[in-house]
Image (cartoon, helix red, strand yellow):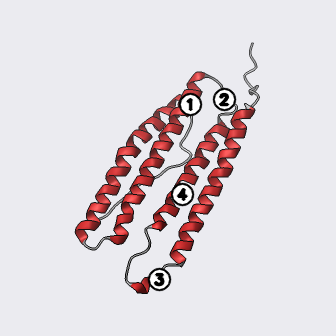
Amino acid sequence: MENLGARHRPNVLFNLVGVLLIVAGCGLTIYGLATAVEIVRGFDPFRGDGPPVAVADGMALAFWGIIVFTIGRYFWRGARKRGGRDRFGRLLIIVGYLLLGVGLDGGLHAAAGLMSASSEATARSAVIEALITTFVWGVPGSILAAIGFRLADEKALAKASVRAEF
């Protein structure tokens, strides 16, 4: 009879990739947030123009850092699991998170148009463009990740949501 309490030895390659991605994700997040804060600190609101659009670049970098960190956690957690179903599920989860990252990045850069909007109509079109961009990339990513969660018997380690009010 098989010993059900025995655990597999961890796959060292998965652990190594996981640690590298976790460290890189933390670094990207910190650098992105620091960049955004530095840009905002250098902003002069008395000049009459809106905050610089480069803030979106810093925040997008922070989003990518969180996504890279999360993918690293999935590699780390998958080091002990075996089987084609688990590996394929993790691949779908990672692809789903990458698509979600593209959607958040595109939506954030589209929403940066709000900073330079001169009228309500331009602001509304910037919000709609941001929502559509996030939706077009985020929904397929969410569906792929949900399928991957079921296949790998995993749970979501990072979540994102978008809301706009008119």
- Picture coordinates of residue 76 (x, y %)? 67, 39
Which element is circle 1 on?
helix
| CA separation in Å, label 3 and label 1 | 50 Å
Is the residue 104 above or below the residue 93 in the image? below
Residue contact between numbered discs 3 and 4, judged by CB atoms under 8 Å: no
Task: Give the structural element (helix, strand or loop) at label 2.
Answer: loop
Q: Check residue 152 in the rendering and tell me which mark sits there, or answer none.
A: 1
- Residue 27: % across, % down: 65, 57
Distance from label 3 to label 4 (Cα)?
A: 23 Å
**Residue under label 4:** 61
Residue drawn 74% across and 28% down?
7
Judged from the image, the secondary structure of the residue bearing numbered disc 4 is: helix
Compare marks 2 and 4 and give the one earlier in the sequence: 4
Q: Which mark is residue 30?
A: none
Q: Is residue 46 left or right of residue 26?
A: left
The x, y position of residue 70, in whole percent, is: 59, 46
Dividing the picture into quarters, in which one does residue 138 lie? Answer: top left
Q: Which residue is mark 3?
A: 44
Q: CA distance from mark 1 to mark 2?
A: 9 Å
